[in-house]
Amino acid sequence: MSAVGIVGGIVQPIVVLGGSPLLVGVMRQIRARLEGRAGAGILQPWRDLRKLLRKEPITPRGTSEVFRVAPLVLVATTLVVAVVTPFLTTSSALGPVADLFAVVALLALGTVALALAGLDTGTAFGGMGSSREMTIIALVEPTLLVAIFALSVRVGSTNLASIITSTVDDPARVISPVSLLAAVALVVVIVAETGRLPVDNPSTHLELTMVHEAMILEYAGPDLALVELASAMRLSVFLGLLANLFLPWGIATSAAPLAIGVGLLAWIVKVTLLGSLLAAGEVFLAKLRLFRVPELLAGSFLLALLAVAASFFLA
Amino acid sequence: MNLLGLTFAVAVAIGLLSAVAATVVPAPSRSAAAGAGTALTGSLAVVAGVLAASGQSVSLALPAVLPLSGVSFTLDRLGGVFVAVTGGVAVAAGIYGISYARRGLDSRAVQAALPVFVTAMLLVPAAASVGTFLLCWELMALASLLLVLAEHRRRPEVASAGRWYAVMTHLGLVTVLIGLLIATAHASDDTFAALRAAHLPPATAGTVFVLTFVGFSSKAGILPLHAWLPRAHPEAPSHVSALMSAAMVNLGIYGIVRVGFDLLGGGPRWWWLLVLALGAASAVYGILQAAMGTDLKRLLGYSTTENMGLVLLGVGAAGLFTSAGRRDLAGLALAAALLHVVGHAAFKTLLFLAAGSVLHATGTRDLDQLGGLRGRMPATTALFGWGALAASALPPGTAFVSEWLLLQALIHGLPASGAATAIAMPPAVAAVALTAGLAVATFVKAFGVGFLARPRSDAAENAHESPPGMLAGIGLAGLASAVLAVMPGVVLPGLGRTAAVVTGSADPLAADAVTVRLAGITGALSPLLLTLALLLGVIVTVGGLRVVAARRARREARLWDCGAGPMSSRMEYTATSFAEPLQRVFDNVVQPETDVDVTHHQESDYLVQAVAYRRRVPDRIERRLYAPVLAAVTQWGQAARRLATGSVHRYLGYGFYAVCGLLLLLAVTR
């Protein structure tokens, strides 16, 4: 635990918390413009959250504590990830927690909490969403872990700070086949995990297609605000992870104010850029059928395995 | 005799005494005598096991007990770990059994078999000669068989499960027996010390290893010899299921480690590649079957196959690293495997006892019939939920730490050693990862469908909480898995040193109360800090919400029902429907059987009276591997019937021709 790590541990969750809805706003605005609409402005997600937070909390009849606790767990897991992952600085506030496996498992824990909440309502929609989400996560997990495996092998550690530091020290690694294959695999996985097109459509309420929205159909008021905020935060955390694993430039290596400032700027720019790319890409995509998604994920799993093979043969 | 020897001897003596007591005392207090005796034996065994695992050892030879070889016992570090685990499970199961066994399970034989079973399981890891080992092994098998058959009067399936178990466990015994006898033939006598000293030729050692591996893996429920496990575990009374699934299967792992590492002193690479491959296959196949299953206890049984597969994966990796000369990694992999054994024992006890509590309250194990137990059985629900989290390798669960350790060993193994390792490691990691993903889906299904939402049947509607005695047993198991999840530093140093001794390496890891650090290679994890951070995250979120959200009272509202009136439980997702997408994804692997029966009206084929839809996910390996063998045996039996018609003349004829043939043969060969 170093000074620079502590600065990161304090600034990062605040930026993620405040910035994530803005990121979603930017992405929606980009989509709107590309589709020829005016768009609601990048502040609209925050306005929605403010509106939801002012409403009264509602508990659907027949649901249990699981339903009420799930949004809290979802936000808490994302907050912990935002604290421990080196986004801003190369060292982490809680080194022994900043393990790639731990971070992935924490994010999965949030998904599980939401899936249980979906089942807890006892509606057909909730069950359907949970069932689909669990199917996707069961297939995403192997790809994610194998891609991590590929990245960790050459560093000899699964600690995020070590992986990022080693890439900063040796930038040529970024264009190695291992990194490129793992990056493609991770992009597919992140698209699936965050429920974006073509795996899930975040802006639909059509029964046949929805996954994430089906699980949260019964949420209202502040609970819904938490779920929406958490899914925005998860998106920016995943994009930040992707950015720093493969493009760690600009990240602060010391606690000097200038370095921190540059690190912050670089982080925000990278995540916004990735988000914009994702949003622009979504304009040209249609949602896949649910049973075509496994093929996509199997493809990314193959890429991750190839990355591992490459990391051995090129070592 | 030191403190260890005394504790262990007293534990065994109490076990045997309570078996006697259970046959003597009258029925009302029989289950109390057997259960309390079992729990006491278990708690003493935990002490003995911990003492042994921390470095003490004790030996005892009684040459007069049996003719020829006598019996001899030695409790060392490796045995100590398994004695402690068995003891821990026995404490929870014993306490639980006192209240659980009241209904129809309090016959003399069944109640006496329980402490005998536990005592036999304690003696197996302590046995120090082939004769003693096989004797204790068989005693354990027979006692457990008796317990599996406890409810045979009430349910006809029990008999079939018992038959499968009896046949497979004895086939396993036969292969272990042959293997160990071959090894003994090359040694001066049948003690383990003599086996260690005898250096077998490689081909013989390979034969011994494969034969014993077959027997031990059938006990551990490893593919393809797992067929008895999902049958016997659900049909046994729940505390017996817990003992079998959390303690007995471990002894299969113990046997593999004992024979492979200790008696045969490591071995060539192919042994451990075989172990690794079967472990990985069992892990994936077991959890896949569990993900499709709807029978709660059968699902847990398949999850045992999965977890034992993961343990075996660790053991195989340890052997592979030893044969490649990376002893530090071998120690780490074996420590991960042992930690998984301990963690699995804790959460599987918890899950089986909680499932027993559900069975006790509702009389059904079918997830499609359950649901809505949260309001009616809050304690059981909370405990099962904790167990499900522990089993699905998510933080802060028990399996998370051991799977993390296992993955660390595999990751560091890739660049370290040789092509075979490098080719074996990525699929191994992929198998662990796929297992982790499917386990999450499985336990979300088991908990979400079984306990949340609305009841799907009258049985679930009228469920009631179990008596405090049962809850105490479950709670104890829950506490153990919580300690293991948050502070694995309590047991890890002992396990690490045990693994180091077995693989001949330095201490593979350093664990204090907060952080687990790997020695020699980089890697650290702190489950305690992680848990605290999560709690803090929840508190901050709640606090933040208090500050920014409008403070209005929580209101109840109707569920959204698409405007079609109140929803019934028929509209809920069941376990079958929950697993349907996964089943479709793995269609080619599991090959489900669907059956649609359409009944038409008599007047016209165009009018449908009823449509019945059935889906079954049969065990494919079983169908491919066992069905042909069983069919062949049946045919052989049918053919033999033609020989035995009941005519005495015919039998006399057989005898006559046999004697003539023998005489001719002797005349020709002499």
Image (cartoon, rainbow, N blue to C red):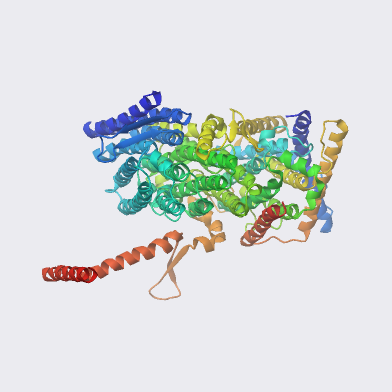
Q: Position of residue B637 (x, y in %)?
A: 27, 66
Could you say which is closer to the camera, residue B601 or residue A178? A178
Task: Tell me if I can see residue A197 in this picture.
Answer: yes
Q: Tell me: residue B266, above or below residue B479.
A: below
Residue that appears at 66% across and 48% down: B415
Q: How many marks?
A: 0
Q: Is residue B603 left or right of residue A247?
A: left
User: Farthest residue in the right direction?
Assistant: A258
Could you say which is closer to the camera, residue B178 or residue A62? B178
Q: Is residue B132 left or right of residue B616?
A: left
Q: Tell me: residue B478, above or below residue B567.
A: above
Corner quadrant of residue A92: top right
Could you say which is closer to the camera, residue B646 or residue B569? B646
Corner quadrant of residue A8: top right
User: Farthest residue in the left direction?
Assistant: B649
User: Farthest residue in the front direction?
Assistant: B670
Q: Position of residue B421 (x, y in %)?
A: 60, 51
Quarter of the picture containing the N terminus of chain A is top right
Q: Position of residue B324 (x, y in %)?
A: 58, 47
Q: Is residue B612 left or right of residue A303?
A: left
Q: Position of residue A203 (x, y in %)?
A: 72, 53
Q: Tell me: residue A166, above or below residue B477.
A: below
Residue that appears at 38% across and 50% down: B179
Task: Tell me if I can see residue A55 in this picture.
Answer: no
Could you say which is closer to the camera, residue B19 or residue B131? B131
